[in-house]
Image (tube, rainbow, N blue to C red):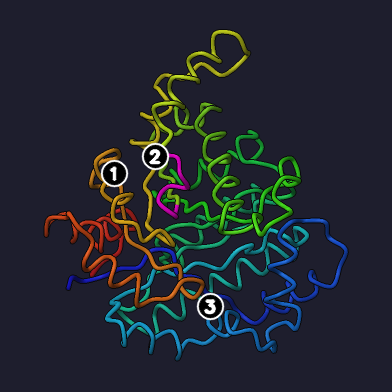
Amino acid sequence: MVFKIATEEAFSIPEVADALGRVSRTDNPSLDMPLVGNLYGQGAAGAHPLLKGLLDWDQRLRVMDENKVDMQLLSLTAPGVQMFESEEAIALARLANDRLAERIAACPGRYAGLASFAPQDPAEAAREIARAKTELGLHGLVVNSHTNNEYYDDRKYWPIFEAAEAHDLAIYIHPRAPAAQIDAGFRDYGMDGAMWGYGVETSTHALRLICSGLFDEYPRLRIVLGHMGEGIPFWLWRIDFMHEVMARSRPMPKLALKPSDYFKRNFAITSSGQENALALRYSIDMLGLDNVMWAIDYPYQPTAPAVKFIDEAQPLTDVEREAVAWRNAARIFHIEL
């Protein structure tokens, strides 16, 4: 058994839960609404076990101790503050970050944290990113893919990336349900969520960032994707090949590198919700050992199988297992142990 930092572990606060409860009673057409209604229909007072897991700090520590999870890297659960109007989103992101910093300070050595921000206002988001690093000492950032059905390859959002690079904070792009541009095909068969839609949504967003030229402008920017890279590592050869083909006939930004080169240089991935030893082995071999981390996805995924997975996954050397279980997370997220 190795030391373990779990790198995609969700929490919430009652104020965000109550605000999402209010959203659940609107006619918002977002494909996030089935999840929001199920979890937050009664606000923070609701009895849904996942909501309890997000809010109950005693239960969280008990589960960690029972399964020998040394540390969780905490992030405000999806959809974060991204379904709110700008003013409310800004205020709730600040509050969630303050509470997160307080929780980390109250439990030394057990938690690290990713700061939320409100993409609705990119300039204010950049200020909150700076505050998260300089005042709160948080370890990275989290954003839940699109906001207002817009992706962040739009240059109006690039102050967010400028601030993240300047403060050396990795951005974890967490999934949410597909944006309105592509959501129609995901509304049946349970395909809107973790079975399929989350991965398609988030990988689409990540590839848009790569193809926009973002990483030529911000070459030190680090993006993290969960769920074994949302499938992108398994498509890199085809992405490179077809990007070159498309660039010959369509107006596209001219990139200095191949898409796969940016993915290997600027991205890291986690194993959240993907307890597949063959996929883990492939990802290490394709992306390099330094770019792969372990995660549970608490409380949405059970802890015990995820711990068993990292303890027993084969074939991994002892050096590889330690790197995936905690060393890479400590380095990428600047966690002092």
Q: Earlier in the sequence, mark 3 or mark 2?
A: 3
Classed neighbour count for the residue bearing mark 3: other residues with Cα under 10 Å, few (<14), some (14–19), many (≥20): some
Classed neighbour count for the residue bearing mark 2: other residues with Cα under 10 Å, few (<14), some (14–19), many (≥20): many
Residue 79 in the image: above or below residue 125: below
Kindly identify the residue that appears in the image at 17 percent across and 54 percent down. Answer: 315
Q: Disc 1 to disc 2, how far (Cα)?
A: 8 Å
Residue 62 in the image: above or below residue 151: below
Q: Quadrant of the C terminus?
A: bottom left
Q: Position of residue 285 (x, y in %)?
A: 24, 41
Tag shown at residue 291:
none
Q: Quadrant of residue 253?
A: top right
Q: Residue furthest left?
A: 318
Main structural element of the magenta stretch: helix, strand or loop? helix
The residue to which callout 1 is attached is 282
The residue to which callout 3 is attached is 99
| Amino acid under disc 3 | Arg
In the rendered view, does 5 fall on the left or right side of 42? left
